[in-house]
Amino acid sequence: MKRVLVIAYYWPPSGGSGVQRWVKFVKYLPSEGWEPVVFAPDGADYPSLDPSFEAEVPASVEVLRGPIREPYAAYRKLTGARSTQVTEISSGEKTWKQKLSLGIRANLFVPDPRVGWVKPSVKALRKYLKEHPVDVIVTTGPPHSVHLIGLRLHRDTGIPWIPDFRDPWSRMYYLRYLPMTAASWRKLRREEQTVLDSCSTVLACTPLMQKDFQAQTRTPVACITNGFDEEDFTGPAPAGDGRFNITHTGLFAADGNPLALWKVLGKLSKTEPGFGQELRIRLAGKVDREVLDAIAAAGLSDNLVLLGPLPHADAVREQRSASLLLLPLRNDPQYAPILPGKLFEYLAARRPVLGIGQEEGAMAHVLFSTRAGITADWEDPAPMRAFIANAWRQHCEGGVPATTGDISPYTRRITTHALALLLDSLPSCHPERSTCHPERSEESLSSCHPERSEGSINN
């Protein structure tokens, strides 16, 4: 069986959507003829925890840990924050302590605050790979500093390497709010370009990201989306509580606060008989204060049910018992290429999905093609009102709103099969038997990447 080394910052006990992509790939890769080996941080400062994901990793999978030092403890001490949240990198007002911390983060930690994990990881993995060869290396980001580990190992060993992008890099929407100097910005762009030009194949998780990356490099760019695990959705859907439940799971960020939606719900509660009594807005996960304030301002405080962060299985039960699932994207044009991981579990829940975001974005395409719901613009209440009214009508008639479109391309088994085909397509550059090992000649290394130049990175 061939072996693939997966280098991932987010790994159990981390929670959140970022960990699920590769936990599920690792779960199903052995059935596709690939033995995964995982390298993850030891002592990472994760923003959320969900130990239940540990049960998803087969006992036979080797998981290596490398120590990591992160700056977040100092950040919390400086700002008084309780946790590290990406929502603080936004256009909102900042205290002087927050401005200072963002300036340090933007210019001393390029490309991100986990960059200190690169050097010790490269050192440890160089030794490991000499004694335990693999056929392919995969790095998955964000954090995109993880790709710098793959870059150095690839140059040292000649082993084929795939950087997997769950989010964009230099085009990530929140970077515009970081006070980066021109020198820091050039460094970040240089690192990105070097990674794109030096790897064997780039892997993106949405078609629009694939298109953007392909415009930047001559390296082939593949696309494998996220998905849902059918094993998480077996059996009949759990019975609801009889209320009209509008449910959101996961982080609810201030820059995705759907103000028009809360106004629509507030008006329906006053004008539609029984709606205000039956409506429940169920939020499972971390919710920013601005979202709660907007719900209160719309007169919906009595309709709000705050569930807090839930284990994954409980979040799935919430999705499957909802009357309507809510998925607002961050209100930023650069978010259009992104497909939130929860979207695919929403599809599997077979409940109507009200998306709020770019009407020509990646999410809108998936919801349309699967007939799972609609995507309304943030400032356009009319389609929101019509969609909610239809779901409410079905609820009043005693029916359970459900979707029936084809979602089979997004099962984890199908996406893992696509990944295995991609891994199989790479040239054999095993350091013990390949002519691609860089210590043998520079020419042999370049033969793995025809017409491609080697970049340089200065950390």
Image (cartoon, rainbow, N blue to C red):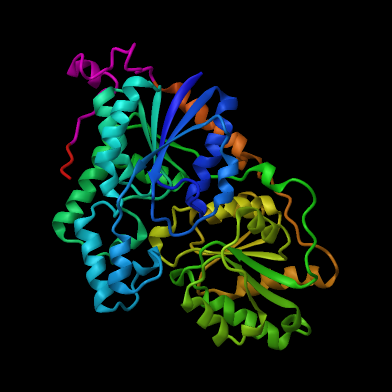
User: Going 20% across and 17% down the picture, which residue do you hit?
Assistant: 439
- Residue at far right of view: 398
Indicate whether 261 appears above or below 417.
below
Indicate whether 386 appears above or below 229.
below
Q: Nearer the viewer, residue 23 or 281?
A: 23
User: Going 52% across and 31% down the picture, which residue do you hit?
Assistant: 61
- The percent coordinates of residue 327 (x first, y second) are 57, 63
Q: Which residues are magenta?
A: 427-455
User: Going 51% across and 71% down the picture, which residue do you hit?
Assistant: 287
Residue 438 inside the magenta-drawn segment: yes
Q: Nearer the viewer, residue 305 or 221?
A: 305
Mark yes or no: residue 300 visible: no
Residue 413 inside the magenta-drawn segment: no
User: Going 75% across and 83% down the picture, which residue do you hit?
Assistant: 277
- The percent coordinates of residue 425 (x first, y second) are 45, 22
Position of residue 261 in the picture relative to residue 204 (left or right): right
Name the main secondary structure of what is drawn in magenta: loop
Picture quarter with the C terminus: top left
The picture quadrant where one finds residue 280 is bottom right
Q: Nearer the viewer, residue 94 or 9?
A: 9
Mark yes or no: residue 408 visible: yes
Position of residue 25 in the picture relative to residue 300 (left or right): left
Q: How many marks?
A: 0
- The percent coordinates of residue 283 (x first, y second) are 60, 69
Position of residue 18 in the picture relative to residue 234 (left or right): left
The picture quadrant where one finds residue 305 is bottom right
- The percent coordinates of residue 80 (x first, y second) are 34, 74
Indicate whether 58 appears above or below 438.
below
